[in-house]
């Protein structure tokens, strides 16, 4: 894989020295947020990681390489280019072969982060089981990648356009621990509440880091990969939206998608754009706030995890 991965020199040095690094996905830049808001938010996320004492590594596919640690100029290019491919883990080889630029989903980010030696990823919300997936079988590869790759993902639950109960059931079936950060309820992306309990909880970065170490240790004990872990962080209270309001917006967006014949990878960007428009921009503000908050939390956990891995001095 060495010839296919390009790791920025300062990130490579940090990883070699055991210093904390947080991987950030780029689909949110290319497809999740409107211009120029996408570029500004990407820089805010990187700044939040640095302020917490870790090094941010935004990922993308550029010039036939898996690039770990985009420069500001490369982030701007991903944000401004119209034809950036949406790259899940199943798309990586084809996009690399084509040389086309690609923005990484959670699944692709987890895959690349693990191969670069990064233990923690920050994002907004993971993909999961779509509403009606019992008929369409439309289930995100994020869940499969989490089940087989030993990386912790900090997020605000799954995207609210999804079937949250089914998504949680699949995560449990696949053996992926879902851990609430200072919450005992699965957050619903824009909302702090979903009515769905989580079975495990931590209340500070040190507890989260200890849990990560034990989870990965169990994988080594069985001489296999332990798979990933989900650390769910509710959106900041000042920016969170009431669950009933969001559900009303989602229902309208889903009807619009059906009427427009939107399918496959185009569904999520279409729905997010509809939600932002119909909420008067409120969902966009919440999305930005939770992205930055999750980046900061991931960095805090990464710092605690690096200390724990280093052991007593």
Image (cartoon, rainbow, N blue to C red):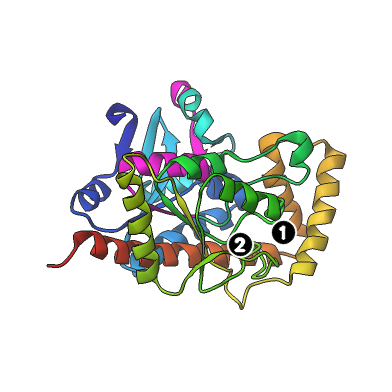
State yes or no: residue 121 in magenta.
Answer: yes
Residue 195 is left or right of residue 142, and the answer is right
Question: Can you say whether 71 is above or below 136 in the image?
Answer: below
Residue 81 is left or right of residue 13, and the answer is right
Quadrant position of the C terminus in the picture: bottom left
Q: CA separation, marks 2 and 1? A: 10 Å
What residue is shown at x 61% (from left), y 41% (from top)?
Answer: 140
Residue 276's disc is: 1
User: Which residue is situated farthest in the front direction here?
Assistant: 222
Select label 2 or label 1 by which is in front.
2
State yes or no: residue 67 in magenta.
Answer: no
Q: Earlier in the sequence, mark 2 or mark 1?
A: 1
**Image: magenta residue range:** 96-122
- x, y percent for residue 234: 58, 68
Does residue 126 appear in this view? yes
In front here: 284 or 299?
299
Disc 2 marks which residue?
287
- x, y percent for residue 192: 64, 70
- x, y percent for residue 193: 67, 70
Question: Can you say whether 99 is above or below 49 in the image?
Answer: above
Q: Would you say the residues marked 2 and 1 are in contact, meaning their CB atoms lie under 8 Å apart?
A: yes
In front here: 14 or 111?
111
User: Which residue is situated farthest in the bottom direction here?
Assistant: 238
Q: Rate crowding at label 2 as few (under 14), some (14 to 19) or many (20 or more) other CA atoms within 10 Å.
A: many
């Amino acid at each position: 894989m060495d010839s296919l991965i390009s790791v920025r020199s300062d990130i490579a040095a940090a990883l070699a020295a055991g210093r904390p690094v947080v991987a950030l996905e780029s689909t949110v830049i290319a497809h999740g947020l409107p211009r120029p808001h996408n570029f500004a938010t990407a820089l805010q996320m990187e700044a939040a990681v640095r302020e917490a004492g870790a090094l941010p590594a935004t990922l993308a596919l550029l010039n036939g390489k898996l690039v770990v640690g985009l420069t500001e100029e490369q982030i701007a290019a991903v944000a401004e280019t119209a034809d950036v491919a949406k790259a899940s883990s199943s798309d990586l080889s084809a996009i690399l072969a084509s040389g086309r630029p690609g923005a990484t989903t959670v699944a692709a980010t987890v895959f690349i982060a693990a191969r670069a030696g990064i233990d923690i990823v920050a994002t907004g919300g993971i993909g999961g089981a779509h509403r009606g997936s019992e008929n369409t079988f439309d289930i995100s590869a994020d869940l499969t990648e989490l089940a087989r790759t030993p990386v912790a993902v900090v997020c605000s639950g799954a995207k609210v356009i999804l079937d949250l109960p089914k998504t949680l059931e699949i995560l449990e079936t696949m053996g992926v621990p879902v851990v609430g950060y200072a919450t005992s309820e699965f957050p619903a992306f824009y909302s702090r509440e979903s009515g769905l309990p989580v079975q495990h909880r931590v209340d500070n970065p040190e507890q989260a880091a200890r849990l990560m170490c034990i989870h990965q240790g169990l994988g080594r004990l069985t001489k296999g990969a332990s798979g990933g872990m989900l650390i769910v962080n509710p959106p900041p209270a000042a920016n969170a939206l009431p669950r009933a309001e969001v559900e009303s917006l989602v229902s309208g967006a889903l009807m619009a998608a059906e009427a427009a014949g939107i399918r496959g990878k185009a569904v999520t960007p279409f729905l997010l754009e509809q939600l932002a428009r119909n909420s008067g921009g409120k969902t966009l503000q919440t999305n930005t706030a939770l992205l930055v908050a999750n980046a900061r939390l991931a960095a805090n956990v990464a710092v605690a995890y690096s200390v724990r891995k280093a052991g007593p001095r």
